[in-house]
Image: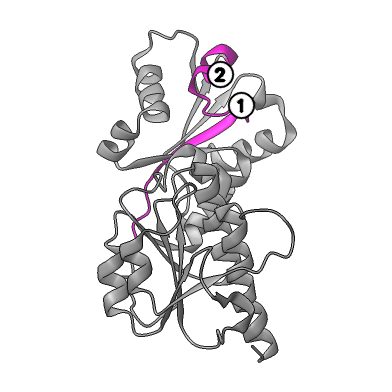
């Protein structure tokens, strides 16, 4: 285990760039996994990351100590002074452990006959991560992000998704109109003013759900290309749902119908 106590250390400076610069992560083809759960999810999906970084105090925690005991032999582990680790942290309360890993690449191309989730300008990393987590839980494997979406592999999005990334085929900077124009299933855009209600749909066959940005919703061009435009009935006085909540309602209505065999 290598110990670093100076912020002038070259390796520490490189780690700091990776943690706080999306440009550096893209250039290096790396992701930052913050927290034990996210690291273990990566290990289960892809094997060991390239490097594990811990704070001095975190090494004393039972869970982290056990992980390092199994992981450390022959692998790169860097221990940082607590103050230095805090400088790397991307959250208010540092977890005490993070890892640097190769960014996974989708091994499957776009499937225009399978279920899909299309995100049109979802800009909040927390919302994006929550939707990815919901998609994985609901059994939707492919997710397409428009160029205006938040970065799928940023530390904040990764943390919000809680390992869901490693169960999905994520396609960033996707041409959503082109995908919808060629899609062979039913495509559904969630639009507040739509006349058709979610619970009137038959979701038994392949479906591409389209969810829009927090402020503007689904763009006009994308909505026009969808097979149908639908709304979620809201008998209460709330004007709208958070996009992550709306996605959860729609995706699990799809699950409900398929499990029960009814629409």
Residue at which label 2 appears: 86
* Relative to 35, residue 253 above or below: below
For the C terminus, the quadrant is: bottom right
Which residue is nearer to you in this view: 138 or 188? 188
Assess disc 1: are there few (<14), some (14-19) or many (≥20) residues with their C-alpha within 10 Å of its C-alpha.
Answer: some
- Residue 110 visible in the current orientation: no
Q: Residue 29's x, y, as percent? A: 30, 43
Return the disc, 2 or 1, that comes first in the chain's sequence: 2
In the image, residue 104 lies in the stretch drawn in magenta: yes
Which residue is nearer to you in this view: 127 or 80? 127
Disc number placed over residue 143 in the picture, else none: none
Q: Residue 11's x, y, as percent? A: 36, 20
In the image, residue 8 lies in the stretch drawn in magenta: no
Identify the residue shown where x is 57% and y is 57%: 133
What SS does tag 1 mark? loop
Residue at which label 1 appears: 94
Callout 2 touching callout 1 (CB < 8 Å): yes
In whole angstroms, how far apart are the C-alphas of marks 2 and 1?
6 Å
Q: Which region of the structure is painted magenta?
A: 82-106
Please tell me in which quadrant of the rendered image residue 260 appears: bottom right
- Residue 36 visible in the current orientation: yes
Q: Is residue 86 left or right of residue 149?
A: right
Q: Residue 51's x, y, as percent? A: 44, 35
């Amino acid at each position: 285990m290598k110990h670093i106590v100076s912020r002038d250390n070259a390796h520490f400076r490189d780690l700091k760039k990776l943690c706080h610069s999306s440009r550096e992560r893209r250039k290096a083809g790396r992701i930052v996994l913050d927290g034990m759960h996210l690291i273990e999810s990566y290990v289960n999906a892809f094997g060991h990351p390239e490097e594990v970084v811990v704070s001095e105090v975190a090494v004393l925690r039972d869970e982290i100590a056990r992980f390092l005991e199994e992981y450390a032999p022959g692998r790169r582990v860097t221990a940082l002074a607590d103050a230095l680790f805090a400088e790397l942290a991307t959250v208010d309360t540092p977890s005490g452990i993070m890892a640097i890993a190769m960014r996974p690449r989708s091994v499957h191309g776009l499937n225009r006959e399978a279920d899909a989730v299309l995100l049109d300008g979802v800009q909040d990393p927390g919302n994006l991560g929550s939707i990815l987590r919901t998609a994985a839980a609901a059994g939707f494997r492919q997710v397409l992000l428009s160029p205006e979406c938040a970065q799928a592999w940023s530390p904040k999005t990764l943390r919000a998704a809680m390992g869901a990334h490693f169960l999905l085929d994520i396609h960033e900077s996707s041409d959503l109109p082109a995908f919808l124009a060629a899609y062979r299933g039913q495509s559904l855009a969630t639009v507040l003013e739509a006349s058709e209600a979610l619970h009137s749909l038959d979701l038994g066959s392949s479906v591409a759900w389209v969810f829009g940005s927090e402020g503007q919703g689904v763009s006009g061009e994308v909505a026009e290309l969808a097979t149908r435009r639908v709304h979620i009935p809201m008998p209460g006085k709330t004007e709208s749902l958070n996009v992550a909540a709306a996605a959860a309602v729609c995706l699990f209505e799809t699950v409900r119908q398929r499990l029960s065999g009814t629409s």
